[in-house]
Image (cartoon, rainbow, N blue to C red):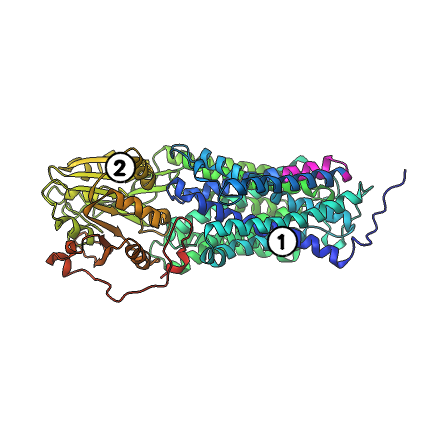
Amino acid sequence: MTAPNLTPSKEGSRSGTVLYVLSIFVSAFLLFQIQPLIARYILPWFGGTPAVWSTVQLFFQVFLTAGYAYAAWLAGRVPGKMQGWIHLVLLAASLVVMTVLGFRWPTPITPGADWKPLGVDTPISDIFRLLLAGVGIPYLLLATNSPLTQAWFTRAFPGRSPYWLYALSNIGSLVGLLAYPFVIEPNLSVSMQGWAWTGGYVLFVLLAGFTAFRALRQGDPARLAAPEPEAAPQTRTAPSLQHQVLWVLLSATASTIYLGATSQISQEVAAIPFLWVLPLSIYLLSFILTYSGERWYNRGLFGGLMVVATLAFVWAAVDKAAPLIPLIAAYCFVLFVSVMICNGETYRLRPEPAHLTRFYLMTSIGGALGGVAVNLLAPLVFNGYWEFPIGFCVVWALLLALLVTRKSTNRGQRLRFIHNVLVGAILLLAGAASLFTLLGGKTPGAQFEKRNFYGVVRVKEGNPGDPEQHTYGLAHGVTLHGLEYTAPDKRDLPTTYYVAQSGIGLAILNHPKRGHGMRVGVLGLGIGTLAAYGQPGDSYRFYEINPQVVQLAQGQGGYFSYLADNRAQTTVVEGDARISLERELAAGQRQNFDILALDVFNSDSIPVHLVTKEAFAVYLADLAPDGILAAHISNRYLNLTPVFWQMAKAYHLTMVTISTPGDDKGAASSAWVLLARDPSLFATPAIAQRAVTLQGYSTNIPLWTDDFSNLFQILN
C-alpha cells in the first residue's frame, strides 16, 4: 500500500493558507467576545459582584482544556478521514442546537428567565450550569479550533511550522477582548450582541468546516515532514513526562501571575473601570510575542529585566504613598517580564508538530490549574492576595535553575532539576503563605483581614495613640465602607459619607416621618453606619451580599457597634439586594420604605443591575408615596448623574444632588442623589439650601435597562 501524496497542490496555495488563518482568527475573536458578553448577561442574576467574572473565566479555562483534550484525541487517535467526518458532524449539530434554542430563548446563547437561579447560595455551580447550557457546545468547538487547525495545517503544508498560528490566535483574542468594552457594548444591546455573536459563529462553522473537509480529503499522512529550520523545536522525539509536567507548571505559573496581578491592580491599587483589561492584554501579548518565534524572547535579556522587575516589585509593595500611574506601571512591568519568561521557556520546550495537540492540552491544563488555584483554593487558604508574589518568586526559582544548569550537557538531567526546583518552590511558597495565614498573619496596618468569594475585607485602625480620635474602618480593597470612633461619646456618631450634612443625613433628618416610626431600607450594609439615625419605633432593613461584612457589622471582633447600639428595629437580609426585594414583592411583602438608600456605587465594580429601569420599578414598588430614594454616587472614575437623570425622567421623579466636602472630624467627601415623587419633600430649608436642582440639565446617554448599559460612556 502506497503512502498518500502529501505534496501540497491546491492546499499549498495562498488562498488555502488564508482560509486557515481566517478560521483561527475568527474563532479566537469569538472566544474572547463570548466571555464578557455572557458574563454581562448573567451578572444581575448573581448580585453583580466582580466574582461572577472570575467564575466565568474559570469555566472558560476549564472548557478550553476540554476543547484541547478533544483536539488531542481527534488528531492523535482517530484516522485522518474520520477526523474530518466527526468534526463536521459536531459543527453541524451545534448549529442545530443553537437554532432550537434561538426559538426558545431571547438569543441562541442567552438562557431565558426561567433559568434564573432561585438563590445565590451556590453561585459557582449555578454559573457553571448556566454557561454549560448557553454556550458550552459552541465554546467547546471554538476552543478546539486553534490546535486542531494547526494539526491539519501541518498536514496540508508539510515542512512549515504551525506555531505562528498560535500567535495569530492570540492576536484575534486580543482584538476580541478590546473590541467588547470599547466597540460592542457601547453600541449594541445584550440581545443584539447575542444575535451578532451567533452570526459570527455561523461564519466560524463555515471556515472550520472547510478545514475539516480538507482533513477528510487528506486522509492519513505517512509521516510529517520536518519543520522549517528557523522554527525547529528543541525536542525531536516524543515528549518525556518531565517535558509535559514542565509545560503544565510553566503555564500554571503564568496563569497564576496574570490572575494575581489582576486582583492586585484592580482591587488593591486602584478601583478604575476596565483596569482588568490591562493585565489580560499583557498576558495575551506575551503569547503573541513568544509564539511568533524565539527572536522575541532572549533568556539573558529577560533575566536582566527580572532584576529590574524585582526592584519595581519591592518599591510598589513598600511605598504606600506611591503615585497611582507609576504604581500600576510597575506591577504591569513585573507581570510582563514574568509571563514572557514563563511562556518563552514553554515555547522553547515545544515538541515537533506531530505532538502539538498534546502540547496545547498540557499548557491549557496548566492555565486551568492556575485558575482553580486563584479562584477556588486561594480564597480558602489565604487572607490576602498572595498569588502574585508567589508566582513571581516561582519565576525567580525558574531563572536560578536555568542559571545553575546552563553548562549542563545532559538535557534529561537539566530538565529533571528544573522540574524539581519548580515543584519545590511552589510547594514551599504556598505552604509558607498558608502557615502565615493560619498564624494570623495580616497585611501591615490591618487589624483584621479575611478573603472570600467577594474579595478581601480589612479592618484598619486609625489614631491608635489618641483615645478621642481612635477609629476602626472597614475597607474592601481600596474602597472605604465605613469608619467608627471608639470613644463612648462618639461611638454612635454618623461618619464618612453619612454625616448629618450629607445627602442621606439631610433626607433622614428632615423627612416628615422622622420621629413617627420611619421605615428605612439600605442596599449595602458596610458597618451599618446609617443605623446611628435610628430612633425607637423606626425600622431599618439592610441588604448585604457579603457574609463577612455582615459578621463584622454585627460585632465580630468588637470593632463596630452601630447595629448593636441601634435604638430602632434592625434587620439584615443576606443576598443580592435586587433579588431579595423581588422575592419579597412576589411574596406580597411590600416594604413601604420612607427612605430607600442605594449605597452600592462608590467603587469601579458597580452592580449595574441595581441602576436599570427594571431595578427602579422594584424600588418604587417598595417606596412609600412620600418616600425618598437616595443614591450614593461618590465615585472618582464614574459620573452616575446622567444615569439617574434618565431614571428620574422615565419615572417622573424630582431629582436633586447634594455634595458634601470632607473634614478632619470624620466626614468624607460625598455626593448623593435624592429622588422623590413629591417635590415638596425637597422644599425643607435644610435640603433646599444644599440641593442642586439640575435645572436645564440634559444628557444624551440612553436610559439604562437590563438589556443595555454602558460604563464606558460615564467615565470621568
Q: Residue at x 69, y 36 (%)?
A: 73
Prevailing secondary structure class for the magenta stretch in the rendered image? helix
498 in relation to 584, above or below: below
Q: Is residue 425 left or right of residue 266?
A: right
Q: CA distance from mark 1 to mark 2?
A: 49 Å
Q: Toward the viewer: 144 or 61?
A: 144
* For residue 74, side relative to residue 622 (left or right): right
Q: Is residue 418 visible?
A: no
User: Camera-side residue: 452 or 597?
Assistant: 597
Q: Residue furthest front?
A: 103
Residue at the disc numbered 2: 552
Instruction: Say which label, 1 or 2, has the lower sequence index.
Output: 1
Give percent across and percent down for residue 325: 40, 60
- Say what amino acid the circle numbered 1 marks: Phe
Magenta segment, which residues? 68-81
Q: Position of residue 166 (x, y in %)?
A: 64, 50
Q: Residues within 10 Å of mark 1 (few under 14, many from 20)?
A: many
Report the quarter where the C terminus lies. Answer: bottom left
Mark 1 or 2, which is nearer the eye? 1
Is 73 in the magenta?
Answer: yes
Say few, some or many: other residues with alpha carbon within 10 Å of mark 2 (under 14 / 14 to 19 / 20 or more): many
Please tell me whether residue 504 is drawn above or below residue 491 in the rendered image: below
Q: What label sits on residue 25 in the rendered view? A: 1
Q: Is residue 178 magenta?
A: no
Residue 551 position by quadrant: top left
Check residue 456 in the rendering and tell me which mark sits there, or answer none. none
Outermost residue, bottom direction? 696
